[in-house]
Image: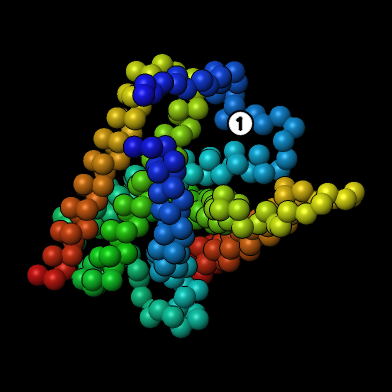
Amino acid sequence: MRESTLWFWHLIAGIVIIFVLGIHIGVMHLDKIMQAIGIMSAGDVLSYADVLARAKTIAYLIIYLLLMWFALYHGFYGLRSMILEISMSKTAQAVVNWVIFLFGFGLAVYGTYAIIIGYTMANA
Amino acid sequence: MKTVVQEKKTRPNRLGIGGWFYGGKYGAERYIFVLHRLAGLGILLYFIIHIFVTGQKIHGKEAWNAAMSSVSGTWFHIGEYLVFAAIAFHGLNGIRLILAEFGLVLGKPKRPIYPYTTANMRIRVLTWSMMILAAILMLVGGYDFFLMH
């Protein structure tokens, strides 16, 4: 794929992450402030009951999948850019590309599996 | 017609790994860029671990509670806050980078009459605005992380 296409999606992923990670951080890590303002109900966001309650809703399914896919792409593309700044042979570049791709893709497969299993478990 | 495939001519990276950190006499943005990447790497490392830790939820309540207790304690809490701070910085600086990439803060072209401003100087206002916003977010986050929990 053309480098400019990959770079374009890196930017698009960045924009998507700002919104979706904003929601995620607000809910998970700024929970006490959100409760104080009255946006969230009081409770422990890390309790298993709360985890299942979130996993149950289709909105969280979409948020988690979007966040994971775009963040993995964004993160691994960024890592790849840093590594490829070092001068190396064409073969070494191909190795870097494949290792980055397989590692990122493997994580995406595992993460998607965990999110979907979590969703079906919570709805069982 | 024959098409000539041109070999891509690139100069070797003379600085090597030092180029990741050394930006010579370039401005603040060049060094913020180094920090941007460092923060990105930190977030990526946390994110990879995060996928496996939170993935434990599919193995039931005991596995989840075990995973949660293995990543708790004061040091993990401080580490989580550092990840939060890194995200605040990386995200807000990233908004500036995307705006600059699409040419939205470059200003209109005009006759350069001395003393003229450059696009870099216009972007610098945005740079420091974003850094101030990031600092505010870090303070608000710190209040939640350490004083409300």
Q: Quadrant of residue B5?
A: top left
The answer, for residue B47, to whether it is visible in the render is: no
Residue A118 locus on image (x, y percent):
18, 61
Query: In front here: B114 or B142?
Result: B114
Residue B103 locus on image (x, y percent):
60, 53
Query: In front here: A25 or A98?
Result: A98
Q: Residue at x 50, y 27 (%)?
A: A85
Q: Residue at x 71, y 57 (%)?
A: B108
In the image, residue A32 sits, relative to residue A82, either above or below, namely below
Name the residue at the bottom extreme: A38
Quadrant where the N terminus of chain B is found in the figure: top left
Name the residue at the right extreme: B114
In the image, residue A94 sits, relative to residue A71, either above or below, namely above
Residue wearing tag 1: B21
Residue A101 locus on image (x, y percent):
30, 36
Query: In front here: B2 or B73?
Result: B2
